Amino acid sequence: MASLIEVTDLKKHFPIRKGVLQRTVGNVHAVDGVSFAIEEGETLGLVGESGCGKTTVGRTVLRLVEPTSGSIKVRGQEIGGLTKTEMRPLRRQMQIVFQDPFSSLNPRIRVKDIVGEPLKVHGVGNASEREDRVAALFKRVGLRAEQMSNYPHQFSGGQRQRVSIARALALDPHFIVADEPVSALDVSIQAQVINLLMDLQSEMKLSYLFVSHNLAVVEHISHRVAVMYLGRIVEYADKVSLFANPQHPYTEALLAAVPLPDPALQRTKNRVTGDVPSPINPPSGCHFHPRCPIATDRCKVEKPMLREIAPGHQAACHLR
Ligand code: SF4
């Protein structure tokens, strides 16, 4: 049976234009040949540092950003070439929760209208049926029905993210891209929102592409994890295998940077320094070679392919 979402060799390059004639002088290689699949009821965690292309992957899969090339299939149906009208029924099934609940909710609109907007746009029910549906969604995400007439500024950050989740659920989707959904929230609130997403998943058989830079959060919510570096997936495995036995030096470095409860036990092995290089002119060969503690000359010239190292565990490294 076809996967719910199947992405093959997805690329998104943003042209850099200069001068009066706006000539293209280069490209930002935001996503550079990414492949993955997400099954019904599954969460794929997509993790990497800021600027690695993970947010662009999420938006391109939903076709909020048009891909440069590659294939995106939903239950086996290619959606890459569909027109806006053809995409419309699929839009109901595919939603997004944004990172920042402060800027993603219009401050001048009552939250009941924000949550009910997708129902209105898709012509679902009459006004009173929509209001009942919004009340049910409010209850489901842990908000009170009497808060429905409030404006976004009357809610805390965690409550605002619950409003965003209610809006994403309005049309009974099958798939949600959660783009750093808890990183703007206090740590004490993050767990509540993550637990809500997990409860909703088991109740509604939802599938998530969970985009985050936070490995601890990704480990908690994901079934499988893809690690991205400069537009490419460098490691792809089930959660247990990836966290217990990371194969790519970049994944090892990310794990080494996760703080331990006891500072005396702080890991020093394989930590990387420096920033992610520019995706305008990425390093040759293995993009990670300038920061890799075990790089060889081969790494500077030859791109490592993502290959299976153990059953269901893939990594892109010449030395593994
Ligand atoms: Fe490091 Fe080379 Fe492996 Fe890249 S291919 S991760 S540079 S050892």
Image (cartoon, rainbow, N blue to C red):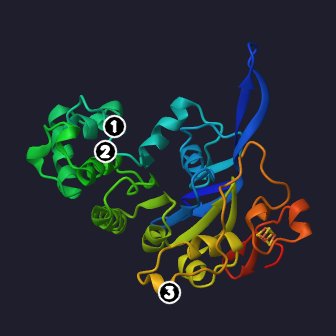
Q: Amino acid at mark 1?
A: Pro
**Which residue sits at x=56%, y=81%?**
267
Residue 48 is drawn in which quadrant? bottom right
Ligand 1 quadrant? bottom right
Q: Position of residue 277 (x, y in %)?
A: 71, 52
Residue closer to the observer: 217 or 205: 217
Calculate the distance from the C-alpha at mark 1 to the C-alpha at mark 2: 7 Å
At mark 1, the secondary structure is: helix
Marks 1,2: beta carbons within 8 A: yes
Q: Position of residue 204 (x, y in %)?
A: 34, 62
**Which residue sits at x=67%, y=69%?**
250
**Which residue sits at x=54%, y=76%?**
239
Residue at the spot of label 1: 118
Q: Position of residue 186 (x, y in %)?
A: 31, 59
Q: Position of residue 17 (x, y in %)?
A: 73, 25
Left or right placement of residue 36 versus residue 104 in this view? right
Q: Amino acid at mark 3?
A: Leu
Disc 1 C-beta below 8 A from ligand 1 = no
Residue at the spot of label 3: 265
Query: Badge 1, how many Cα within 10 Å: few under 14, some, many 20+?
Result: some
**Which residue sits at x=24%, y=28%?**
108
Residue 167 is tagged as: 2
Q: Amino acid at mark 2?
A: Arg
Q: Vertical placement of 126 versus 5: above or below? A: above
Can see residue 63? Answer: yes
